[in-house]
Image (tube, grey):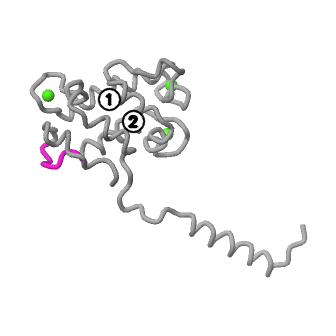
Amino acid sequence: MNIKPKTAMLIMATLFSTTMLSAPASAAEPMLSTGGYANQLQKMEMMKMLDADGNHMVSAAEADAYYTSIFDALDKDQDGSVDAKEWVGTSGKSKLDLTTGGYSRELRTMKMMGMMDKDGDHKVTKDEFLAGHHAIFAHMDTSGDNELSAQEWVAKNVAGK
Ligand SMILES: [Ca+2]
Ligand SMILES: [Ca+2]
Ligand SMILES: [Ca+2]
């Protein structure tokens, strides 16, 4: 390699500007989920599955317990993280217990996996999974009382933000 300093500078400058241009336009409002996921989650049928004590409110603790069970169901080899294979599941067996078929299908997309995989190592740890769902919960909890009413549940405010 025999690159003159001036040429090297030019290459550096080009690389730098390319990197800048490919950065996301705005990180102010991060996407919490896909629209398909939000639609399936925000069904009354799903709310009933999370509302373990049946008082028509989903508490933060109920949500945590629910998503912990979902994570454990996904983490087939129980190594504490869900890889792409575990996430998508083997064909024909992608329906998770405790969820609707529509919810399972929308959760187990690579796009949703990418949104939950915050550090981008192609694995979703339990922390990442719960943190992702905490963010969705907090967004749905417009009254801020750490519980979701049916009204908050079905409000279509998660998708498309
Ligand atoms: Ca409840
Ligand atoms: Ca695993
Ligand atoms: Ca990860």
Q: Position of residue 111 (x, y in %)?
A: 48, 42
Quadrant location of the N terminus?
bottom right
Q: Which residue type does callout 1 highlight? A: Tyr
Sequence-earlier tag: 1 or 2: 1
Which quarter holds ligand 1?
Answer: top left
Magenta residues, as a range?
139-145
Quadrant location of the C terminus?
bottom left
Q: Position of residue 80 (x, y in %)?
A: 46, 26
| Residue 75 as seen in the image, left or right of residue 9 | left
Whole-angstrom CA distance, mark 1 to mark 2, is 8 Å
Q: Which residue shows up at 69% across the image and 73% down it?
A: 14
Q: Position of residue 134 (x, y in %)?
A: 29, 41
Question: Which residue position holds label 2?
Answer: 129
Question: Which residue position holds label 1?
Answer: 67
Does 106 appear in magenta?
A: no
Q: Nearer the viewer, residue 75 or 26?
A: 26
Q: Single out the residue that lies furthest toward the right.
A: 2
- Contact, CB < 8 Å: mark 1 with mark 2? yes
Q: Which residue shows up at 17% across the image and 33% down it?
A: 59
Does 143 appear in magenta?
A: yes
